[in-house]
């Protein structure tokens, strides 16, 4: 994902920062504990498509 795009994207719920995870298939909002999928290079920023982060993922830095 383009770093410029990641800089302007925000969590749709809390408007906080998102972090691209290591395998680059999700954007994580640690504040809300949600992982938004990236499909075909496009982030899906819908709460209904997000999955909850587990405790280890929330702390993973």
Image (spheres, rainbow, N blue to C red):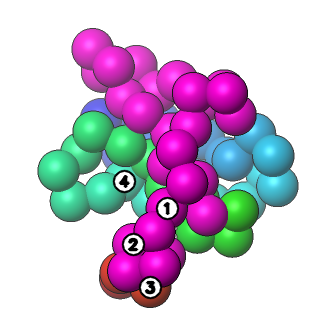
- 41 to the left or right of 44: left
For marks 3 and 4, give the CA distance: 14 Å
Give the residue pinned by disc 4: 20
- Marks 3 and 4, the one that precedes in the sequence: 4
State the residue lying farthest toward the left. Answer: 23
Residue 53's tag is 1
Label 3: few (<14), some (14–19) or many (≥20) C-alpha neighbours in 10 Å: few
The reply to whether discs 2 and 4 touch (Cβ–Cβ < 8 Å) is no
Between label 3 and label 1, give the one nearer the viewer.
1
Disc 4 on helix, strand or loop? strand
In the image, the segment drawn in magenta is 33-58
Disc 2 on helix, strand or loop? helix
- Marks 4 and 1, the one that precedes in the sequence: 4
**At 82% across and 55% down in the image, what residue appears?**
14
The reply to whether discs 3 and 2 touch (Cβ–Cβ < 8 Å) is yes
Between label 4 and label 1, give the one nearer the viewer.
1
């Amino acid at each position: 994902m383009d770093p410029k795009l990641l800089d302007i994207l925000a969590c749709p719920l809390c408007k906080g920062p998102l972090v691209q995870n290591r395998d680059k298939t999700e954007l994580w909002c640690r504040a809300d504990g949600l992982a938004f999928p990236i499909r075909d290079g496009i982030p899906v920023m819908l709460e209904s498509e997000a999955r909850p982060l587990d405790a280890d993922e929330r702390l993973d830095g």
